[in-house]
Amino acid sequence: MNSIGRSTFDELVDTLLHRAENLIPAEVLPDLPGTEVTRDAPRWYSFEYDTWQIGEQIRQLTAEHKKKLHIGQINRILAICMDKRAKRGRQSFIMLLAKKSYNEYASHLIPLLNDDDVDGHVIYTLYRMQAGEYVEAVKPFLSHKRTWIRNEAKKYIQKYQSSTAR
């Protein structure tokens, strides 16, 4: 696909953000029960899938057209990230910020380390942002019940522990 201009890119991203914002329910819904296979992981609501997919569409747009998000879009993304009503649909929005160029927003994600729906995605994003100043906040995840989250924490700490000790 040919690269698109900034105004067209912004229109597409803003339309997708508007769609995602409108999918978020008015209140926090209870977790759905798990399945036989995933007893400890609740099933997803359809709005979670749809929200997650929109975040991924925005990621694909930024990658394909090599465009950065502007501050207004980043603020809207951060608002979605922080909105617990969006549940696990926020994961892809957190990962949208997983670039060094968005490092300045790392501190906004730290409170989400206390959120089971997105904690591993925050660690993944902090690592890719090269936000190495959160070693102490990430250390507890070395004993997380989910292997992939333990592995993300280990990778983060291995990379940044020595650099923060200086």
Image (cartoon, grey):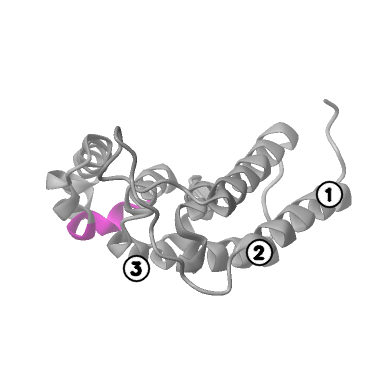
- Above-or-below relation of 74 to 162: below
- Specify few, some or many for label 2: CA neighbours under 10 Å numbering under 14, 14-19, or 20 or more: some
Rendered residue at 58%/53% (across/down): 47
* Between marks 2 and 3 in the image, the one whose residue lies nearer the viewer: 2
**Which disc number belongs to residue 19?**
none
**Residue 142 placement, left or right of 112:** left
Q: Residue 27, percent across and down?
A: 51, 74
* Between marks 1 and 3 in the image, the one whose residue lies nearer the viewer: 3
- Specify few, some or many for label 1: CA neighbours under 10 Å numbering under 14, 14-19, or 20 or more: few
Instruction: Residue under label 3, please give it.
Output: 111
Q: What secondary structure do most residues of the magenta stretch adopt?
A: helix
Q: CA distance from mark 1 to mark 3?
A: 32 Å
Total marks shown come to 3
Q: Element type at marker 2?
A: helix
Q: Nearer the viewer, residue 98 or 140?
A: 140
Q: CA distance from mark 2 to mark 3?
A: 21 Å
Q: Amino acid at mark 2?
A: Glu
* Between marks 1 and 2 in the image, the one whose residue lies nearer the viewer: 2
Outermost residue toward the top in this view: 1
Q: CA distance from mark 1 to mark 2?
A: 22 Å
Q: Earlier in the sequence, mark 1 or mark 2?
A: 1
Instruction: Give the residues drawn in magenta, as a range.
Output: 131-137
Instruction: Residue under label 1, please give it.
Output: 6
Residue 133 magenta-highlighted: yes
Q: Is residue 166 visible?
A: no
Instruction: Residue under label 2, please give it.
Output: 21
Q: Earlier in the sequence, mark 2 or mark 3?
A: 2
Q: Residue 6, percent across and down?
A: 83, 49
- Above-or-below relation of 136 to 36: below
Quadrant that contains the C terminus: bottom left
Q: Amino acid at mark 1?
A: Arg
